[in-house]
Every structure is written in C-alpha cells, then in structure tokens.
Amino acid sequence: MQQNLPDGVKISDLIKHVDPRGYFIEVFKQKWIEELPLIQWNVVRSKKNALRGMRVHIKHYDYVIIFEGKAVYALRDLRQGSPTQGLVSMVHIEGKHPQSVIIPPGVAHGFYFFKPSFYVYGVTEYYDKEDELGFYFADPDAGIKWPTSDPIVTERDVNLPPLKSIMSQIPTWHASST
C-alpha cells in the first residue's frame, strides 16, 4: 500500500534472498537513481525509544535503508510551491521488509525507533553543517504525531528552534525527476 508522500520522496522494496546461511540484499545500484550520485555513506545504530530529528537539507538527497529493527520515518514537505507543501507522512519501515527511502532537499525528516535498529544512508553531498537545518521534533506547528511522549533524544535535538524560524532558508520546490 503506497501512502501519500511528499513530492520526490520514493520508497522502493528491496529483495531479500534468504538461504540456510542467512540472507543477501542488493541495496543500491547507481543505475536505479543515476541522477543522484551518492558520494558519502553513513551507518547508524539507534536504541529502542530513540528519536532522531527533525532535519532538513537545502542541497542534498538522502537514500536510507533500515537493516535491523523497526522505525517510523516522519516526513514533512517544507518547500514553497511544492504540490505537497505542508504534507506530513509517517512511513513505517523495518528490517524484515527492506526498503529504500529517497528524501529530496526541503523535505524534513526524523526517525522514531520502536526497537534497537541499524540503518545506513547515502547522501549526494559531503557533510556540510550549512546544509543541515533542524527544528524541534515536538513543535506543534510541524503537525507530527509521534508514537511516544518521552523519547530518548539528544540535547542538540531538544534545543533546536521552532519550525517557523527556519522556513525562510528552505529551498523553493522544483519538479523532481526521481
């Protein structure tokens, strides 16, 4: 069942080949998304009840795959002029049903983990603190209904500004080819 997603967000099922030794998954082929050269990969392990976010990038795309665990990925389209501007989506993903999720610039995103989880993500730009904006995950103006009221969060995430304070920095929407 495909849900209503912000424009340019893509979710693709990945095939898990299981045998007596374990499993094999093709997680990425450049030809799947030739227009998005992924140049840096990162690995993240999160504890049960951890919340990461909210983040939004001005320049780069994220390509995310969860391998172990279960999470909900909160998405909100912040791009002025986007056909899905303001749309909030809660995407449930888990390692036993592997999927890739592509997040374009201007779409805010954050994770809540229901159990210990392990994921990787690739990006189309090298890390640049100027490209990473964030807002307070529990900001009522964001319209995100998290499945917990007491998550494990970092001091950094708790101290992020309200959504309205970063809106002037969000890129204008451009039709996506992804």
Image (cartoon, rainbow, N blue to C red):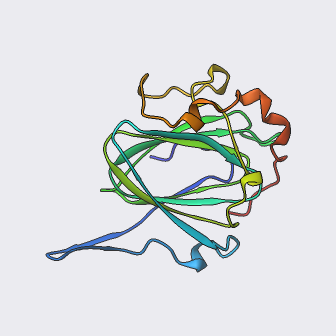
Q: Is residue 41 visible?
A: yes
In the rendered structure, the answer to whether residue 83 lies left or right of residue 144 reads right
Q: Report the residue at 37% width, 69% height from top.
A: 15
Q: Is residue 141 left or right of residue 12?
A: right
Against 73, residue 95 (above or below) is below
Is residue 44 or residue 87 the one in the foreground?
A: 44
Residue 6 visible at all: no
The x and y percentages for residue 145 are 51, 26
Q: What residue is shown at x 65% (from left), y 27% (from top)?
A: 142
Residue 102 % position (x, y): 59, 58
Measuring 64% from the left and 43% from the top, which residue is drawn there? 55
**Residue furthest toward the left?**
20
Image-based side of 169 in relation to 123, left or right: right
The C terminus, quarter of image: bottom right
The tally of labels here is 0
Residue at coordinates 83% horizontally, 42% vertically from top-left?
Answer: 169
The one nearer the camera, 111 or 75, is 111
Image spot of residue 53 (x, y percent): 57, 40
- Foreground pick, 23 / 1: 23
In which quadrant of the rendered view does residue 162 lie?
top right
Residue with the most extreme front position: 155
* Residue 45 position (above or below residue 126): above
